[in-house]
């Protein structure tokens, strides 16, 4: 009998441990602390911190969920590094980018990390296995800010705030290109004023770019490489734009208005404006699409928004000035 009780207790303890381990963990960049925080989204507890460089803005996590990469944009002086953080030990080191200034947007694909560099007007690639930057390509556009890599890796996109453009990078579909992963063609597409937040639709057919300076959203047909529709969404200063995983909704953070704007992707119409607080910035959507996590930087919290009721169901406290976010496994 005692043996049976012991087995039951051990099984329950193991189940509780596994449940705790499976709880989603949020990696949050806290700009006001020059650090990242790891947050358990179910309990709301901060599980740990790790230092970054000065003025961190964005974060990407490796496919295995073990390593975070943080762009150190800088504050008093232009930044020139990417923090590489082990999410298990929380040890952090800096990858010095030398003359490259103001790294910002990040995207992980195929085990490698792509990053934009604003002042140098380019996109680069860091190879973790070799521990070096092995590729750079100029955009010729001002303030190259955010980066996206398509699901198949055949296209990349940058938002260029100062040139009112989106750059599309495409790998030529030829045998020679397949043997040379560094061969890309690029096309600059004129969009609305000050494009910053952008996202690729889940089917890869459209890219939506939010104009931070004119309250617009430019919808780009990816195959045609041109704007096919412009929406007037009347934001005061759009910061980030994200599709839900099913492609049905588009979320836009309005930094100056302190709101989250929700659009129906099919009808292109507004569904809801949700007041969240001061300086609404980064957006991260749960993989199953039920909730959005929105950084309210000016109020030092992350608003958890239910995407069925369009209401704030809780607030997470990660630290001072939360912005970029990513999921850790």
Image: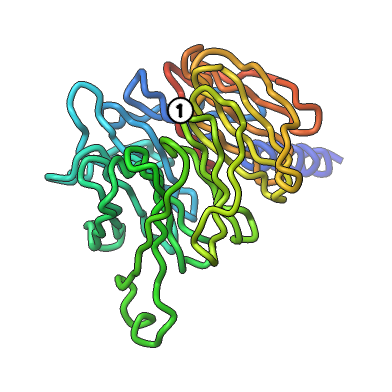
Q: Residue at x 52, y 22 (%)?
A: 236
Q: Which residue is drawn at 50% across and 58% down?
A: 226
Instruction: Name the element at disc 1.
Output: strand
Residue 20: x and y in percent read 65, 36
Instruction: State whether residue 329 appears in this view.
Output: no
Q: Which residue is drawn at 70% across and 42% down?
A: 268
Residue 47: x and y in percent read 50, 27
170 and 178: which is toward the camera: 170
Compared to residue 311, the image places residue 85 above or below, namely below
Query: In the image as oriented, which residue stretches furthest toward the bottom?
Result: 175
Left or right: residue 167 compared with residue 122: right
Instruction: State whether residue 58 appears in this view.
Output: yes
Q: Mark 1 points at which residue?
A: 323
Q: How crowded is mark 1: few (under 14 residues within 10 Å), some or many (20 or more)?
A: many
227 and 78: which is toward the camera: 227
Left or right: residue 232 compared with residue 157: right
Left or right: residue 3 compared with residue 37: right
135 and 158: which is toward the camera: 158
312 and 1: which is toward the camera: 312
Q: Residue at x 69, y 39 (%)?
A: 19
Compared to residue 210, the image places residue 253 above or below, namely above
Query: In the image as oriented, which residue stretches furthest toward the left?
Result: 99
In the rendered image, which quarter contains the N terminus? top right
Compared to residue 314, the image places residue 249 above or below, namely below
């Amino acid at each position: 009998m005692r043996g049976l009780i012991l087995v039951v207790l051990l099984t329950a303890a193991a189940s509780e441990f596994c449940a705790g381990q499976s709880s989603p963990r949020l990696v949050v960049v806290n700009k006001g602390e020059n650090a990242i925080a790891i947050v358990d989204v179910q309990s709301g507890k901060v599980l740990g911190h790790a230092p970054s460089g000065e003025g961190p803005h964005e974060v990407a996590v490796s496919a295995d969920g073990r390593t975070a990469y943080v762009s150190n944009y800088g504050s008093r002086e232009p930044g020139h590094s990417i923090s590489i953080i082990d999410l298990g030990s929380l040890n952090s080191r800096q990858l010095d980018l030398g003359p490259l200034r103001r790294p910002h947007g990040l995207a992980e694909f195929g085990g490698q990390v792509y990053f934009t560099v604003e002042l140098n007007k380019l996109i680069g690639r860091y190879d973790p296995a070799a521990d070096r930057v092995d590729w750079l390509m100029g955009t010729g556009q001002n303030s190259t800010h955010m980066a996206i890599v398509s699901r198949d890796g055949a296209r990349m996109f940058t938002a260029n705030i100062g040139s009112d453009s989106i750059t599309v990078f495409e790998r030529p579909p030829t045998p020679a290109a397949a043997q040379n992963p560094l061969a890309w063609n690029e096309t600059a597409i004129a969009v609305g004023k000050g494009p910053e937040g952008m996202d690729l639709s889940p089917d890869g057919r459209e890219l939506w770019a939010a104009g931070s300076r004119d309250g617009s959203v430019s919808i780009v047909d990816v195959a045609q490489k041109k704007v096919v529709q412009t929406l007037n969404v009347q934001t005061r200063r759009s910061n980030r734009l994200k599709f839900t995983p099913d492609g049905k909704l588009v979320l836009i953070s309005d930094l100056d208005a302190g709101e989250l704007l929700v659009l129906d992707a099919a009808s292109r119409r507004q569904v809801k404006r949700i007041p969240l607080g001061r300086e609404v910035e980064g957006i991260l959507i749960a993989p199953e699409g039920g909730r959005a996590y929105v950084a309210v930087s000016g109020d030092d919290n992350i608003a958890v928004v239910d995407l069925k009721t369009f209401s704030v169901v809780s607030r997470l406290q990660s630290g001072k000035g939360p912005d970029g976010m990513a999921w850790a496994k």
